[in-house]
Amino acid sequence: MNVHSEKAPVVTMRWVGEVDGYLELIDQTKLPSELVQMPCHDVETVWEAIRALRVRGAPAIGIAAAYGVCLGLQTFTGSSHADFLHRLEEVSSYLESSRPTAVNLFWAMNRLRTRARQEDQRESSEELLACLLEEARRIEAEDLEACQRIGAHGAELIEPETGVLTHCNAGGLATAGYGTALAVIYAAHEQGKAIHVYADETRPLLQGARLTAWELHQHGVPVTLICDSMAAQVMREGRVRCVVTGADRIAANGDTANKIGTYSLALLAEAHGIPFYVAAPTSTFDLSLSSGEQIPIEQRANEEVTHMQLFPTAPEGIGVYNPAFDVTPARLIRGIVCEHGVISPVNTDQIAKFVSR
Ligand code: MRU
């Protein structure tokens, strides 16, 4: 998380060494109590880290999976390009089975597949692996740059003295660094705008309380934590003048999947006449889906709702519904901030124009 700050940057993840190296990432399930680096020496550890939300947030999942592919191919012993592609397919499909909603995961796997196919003149598996590692590093570097651009474009939308509401964590921890929704906030703050952030705690896994509040606090951005159910009251009291969230997958028409609770916020923002913005790199757009109805929504374990850590908060055996994401219709989104600028109005034509740049 190489956020622009006077304080020492916290690194969300990094590849240590060369082709025989390993991935090290912050175990985000331990935050905010402990800042623990977790080494990943094999692809199974990366799969588990994604599944268990040790590394989470759409762009960060894609980057971790790209490095996970490199780990999965370190043990490849075959000699032909075709065998290498076959093993790559096994490893990338396995990583794709970790979580279904964030399209950045599938986008990153396709980048590696394409790169490996292009390298058909390479003789050795070491050379092919070096190409994949280079591609994974490129994905990470491009994401950092996209986040910085998102911050610069998005800061223009933020008034000089204002309250901003955000949901879940779309910060440095969710990306290569700097974040998407939080990039907008960091950039506005760096420009000297007196902004105050209201962070939704984000039930059931509390990414807002554990991660966003921690990140903003670390970087000296004024932040107040609220329960998700307080958002309407905070808006009615005039404490926030806009909402900015991240995204996990944006369909061709602008319908946007993001952490469960985002759709309610967009409806509340509309009811209070407050603009609702989404911030996401173009790697989060899925133009193969015409609308949000086709976005796969991850269903997670009942225990995430019935327990706080290991402590039960509901009767044993109670029925639970736990979709991890919801879809906000494009009509409720005032603008989508991507690395190429602000897409507004949000519709199929505008999105096609921006994403093809
Ligand atoms: O389940 P999570 O924590 O991976 O969900 C993350 C979100 O919903 C983020 O808002 C989204 O991935 C954008 S991250 C820049």
Image (cartoon, helix red, strand yellow):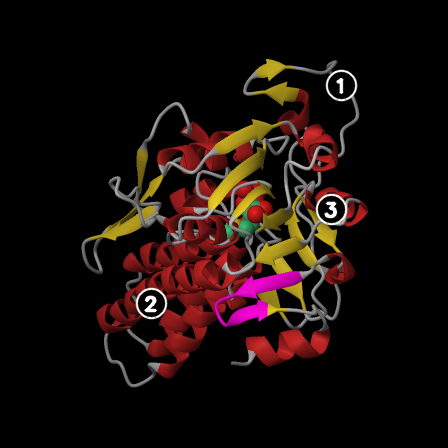
Q: Residue furthest bottom?
A: 121
Q: Identify residue type, mark 2.
A: Arg
Residue 264: within the magenta?
Answer: no
From the viewer's side, name the closer residue of 14 and 327: 327
* Dot 3: element: helix
Seen from the viewer's position, the closer of residues 188 and 293 is: 188
Q: Earlier in the sequence, mark 3 or mark 1?
A: 3
Image quadrant where residue 72 sits: bottom left
Q: Quadrant of residue 55?
A: top left
The residue that mark 1 highlights is: 317
Residue 31: x and y in percent read: 42, 29
**For the point 71% across and 37% down, which residue is it?**
235
At which x and y percent is residue 214? 43, 32
| Residue at image point 64% right, 62% down | 335
- Residue 294's disc number: none
The residue that disc 3 covers is 269
Q: Is residue 266 visible?
A: yes
Which callout, 2 or 1, points to the residue nearer the camera? 2
Counting from the top left corner in percent of width and height, residue 151 is at: 45, 58
Q: Does the rendering let one see residue 91? A: no
Q: Earlier in the sequence, mark 2 or mark 1?
A: 2
Q: Which residues are magenta?
A: 335-342
Give me the C-alpha separation between circle 3 and circle 2: 37 Å
At label 1, counting other C-alpha atoms closer than 10 Å, the crowd grade (few under 14, some 14-19, many 20 or more) is few
Callout 2 secondary element: helix
**Left or right: where 154 falls relative to 240:** left
Q: Is residue 72 left or right of residue 225?
A: left
Tell me where residue 87 appears, x and y as whole percent: 41, 65
